[in-house]
Image (cartoon, helix red, strand yellow):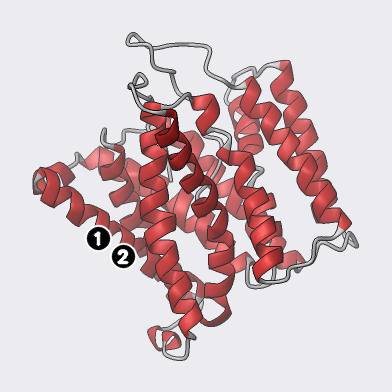
Amino acid sequence: MTAPATTSPHRDVSAGAVWVALAVVYVAWGSTYLGIRIVVEDLPPLLSAAARFLTAALVMGTFLAVRSGPRVLRVRARELRGAAIVGVLLLAGGNGGVVLGERTVPSGLAALLVAMVPLWLIVLRFAAGERPRLLTWAGVLVGFLGLGVLVLPGGGVGGTTTGIAFIVGASLSWSVGSFLSPRMPMPANPFVATVWEMLAAAIALLVLGTARGERVHDFAGASIGSWVALGYLVVFGSLVAYTAYVWLLQNAPLSLVSTYAYVNPVVAVVLGAIILAEPLTAAIVTGGAIVVVGVALVVRAERPRRRGPTGEPVEPLRTGTQA
C-alpha cells in the first residue's frame, strides 16, 4: 500500500512499541508471499485477490465511519480519481501480477523479484529529471546484478519464464504507482486513501479475472487451507500490517521503517523453505543476497535530507511493496 507523502514528527513512544510494530510489518508482509502461494493452489487468482481487497476495504471503511463518522470517507472527485489510478497500479497491477506469477514461481523467489521496486523507482525518478546520488546508483547496479542472477536461464531458481515475467511486470506496475502517488491529488487521510485504492483495485481485478474466464463457482472446490490463507491475507496483510506501517511512519525514523524493504524478502524465502519446502538453490541465495544488498544501499542513500517546516521528511522514498 502507499505511504503518506509526509510523516509527522516522532512522538514520545517506547522503543519496545516501535520494535513490536516493526516485527509485525516484517513478518506479516514477508509472509504474504507464502499466503498467496497457498491461495492460488485452489482459488482463482484474480478473483481471490479482488475478494481480499474488497473485504479489507469494507472492514477498514466501516471502522473509519464508526470511529469518525461517515463523512470521513468523502473525497473530492479529483482525489477519488487519483486514488483509483494509484490503487489499480499498486494493487491490481502489482498484486495481480504477483498472484498470477506465484502459480508457477516459488514464493521466496517472488518476494526477491518484488524487492526490486526501490531500484525501479530510482530509474523512474532519473527519467523524470532527478539526479540520484552516486551511492544510490551503486545500489541500483548491484540490485540489477542480483536480478540477473535470479532470472538467468538455467540458474536453477525454479518457476516458469511466464510466471517470472508476471512478477517483474508487477514490480514495475507497483513502482509506477508509487512514483505517481505523491504527484497526484490524493485524500489527505492515508487510511481513507487506502480504502478507495482497495475498492478500485477490487473492481479492476474482478473485471480482469472475469475476462480470464475465472468464475465465482471456482471458489467451491477450494481447500480449507486456501480459505485460511485468504483470510490471513485480508486480516494480517491488508489490515494489521498496514496499520502498523502507518503508525511507524508517524513514530519512528524513516530509515528504520525502510528496513522492511530488505527484511521482507528474507522472511519470505525462509518461510517458503520451511513450510512449503521450496528449494534454496545457490542461485536464489546468491542472487537474493545481492538484491538485498542493493536495496539496502539505496535505502541508506535515500534517507531524507530535506525537512518540511515542522521537521518532517519531504517526499520519502517508498521503498517496497505489500503483497
Task: Give the secondary structure at mark 2.
Answer: helix
Residue 312 position within the rendered picture, expressed as x and y whole percent measured from the top left: 39, 16
Report if the CB atoms under discs 1 and 2 are less than 8 Å apart. yes
| Residue 146 placement: quadrant | top right
Residue at figure coordinates x 19%, y 41% from the top left: 75
Q: Residue furthest top?
A: 309
Observer-nearest of 233 and 102: 233
Residue at figure coordinates x 49%, y 78% from the top left: 226
Task: Name the residue type under label 2.
Answer: Thr
Describe residue 4's horizontal placement relative to residue 43 as left or right: left
Q: Which residue is mark 1?
A: 58
Q: Which residue is mark 2?
A: 55
Residue 298 position within the rendered picture, expressed as x and y whole percent measured from the top left: 66, 28
Task: Name the residue type under label 1.
Answer: Leu
The residue carrying pointer 2 sits among few (fewer than 14), some (14 to 19) or many (20 or more) residues within 10 Å by Cα, namely some
Residue at figure coordinates x 64%, y 40% from the top left: 262
Residue 12 appears in the picture as rendered: yes
